[in-house]
Amino acid sequence: GVQLVAATDTCGWNYNNLHWDLSSLRKTRPQRDYSVKRDSWTFFMNVCDNTIKIPPACKKQFGNEVAPAPGYQTLHKNGESACYYMGNVNTGVWGLLDENAPESGLKLTYSAGTQCDGRTGRSMEYHFICDPSIEGPGEPVTVAGECRFMIIWQTKMACPYYPASSFGMTWWGLIGIGVYLIGGFVYNVRLKGMPIAPSSLPHSESLRAVGLLLMELLGALFERVRGMFERVRGTTGTASVPKYGIGGEESQSLNRPASGPQNL
């Protein structure tokens, strides 16, 4: 499973009943961008957004035409410098590291970077590996590849969780209320010597008032529903309908004497 994600989207992903929230990995001002060195190359990057700052090598190469990007590949060697875009933030795609083991982590890919070999554009693919033992959000430690850069990142943020459902929250809320009422009742009876009666419940007067209000509301609702049924029954009652025989004339009653002379 994959899903497109733009820079303005929340930095998270849902897959089946699993959820990831990587918003804490996004760098914002006044923080510094992530950076990884590899030989003479330095990679600057951010997650779910463009980098905060433009690297000096990119400013030198492109001047005022330098474009924002989620990652840059820069070179500093023997007084020379170079800058390449590693991707476009609007091309982000979420995916799983292993569809057979979704809990192992996920990946985020940005493409449409600077042309690499005349045919392939540069791209960067974060490999967020689930590691609960990592303190804090962690950071990228390795950038592999030449045109398609794989960024290895071990973090507990890559470990999915199951978002709580509204039904579950309601259920636990009811359990909490029940525990509070029972605990307060036992406390009032055993320690305060109050009688074993509904009045010993915590906030018994408030509960009684709420109960009376609910009873009034239910009674009003019952009366309204009953009135609706009675109105419906009154409009659908049976009415006398004349019976017609063949030709549309009213049928003669069997007990009505026939008109005309009678044979004796």
Image (spheres, rainbow, N blue to C red):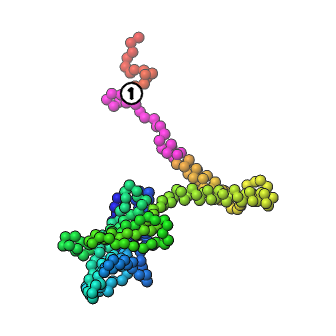
> How far across and how far down the image is residue 113, in percent?
26, 74
- Say which residue appears at 42% left-offset and 79% top-offset: 28
- Say which residue appears at 39% left-offset and 79% top-offset: 33
> How far across and how far down the image is residue 80, in percent?
26, 86
In front of the other: 35 or 217: 35
In the rendered view, would you say 198 is above or below 262? below
In the rendered view, would you say 246 is above or below 180? above
Q: Quadrant of the N terminus?
A: bottom left
Q: Is residue 66 visible?
A: no
Q: Is residue 230 left or right of residue 211?
A: left
Q: Does the magenta-highlighted stretch encompass residue 242?
A: yes
- Say which residue appears at 71% left-offset and 60% top-offset: 184
- The residues colored magenta run 229-250
> How far across and how far down the image is residue 112, in percent?
26, 72
In the rendered view, would you say 166 is above or below 262? below
Q: Amino acid at mark 1?
A: Ser
Q: From the image, tell me which residue sits under label 1.
A: 251
Dot 1: within a 10 Å radius of its alpha carbon, few (fewer than 14), some, or many (20 or more) residues?
few
Q: Is residue 257 left or right of residue 195?
A: left
> How far across and how far down the image is residue 26, in percent?
41, 74
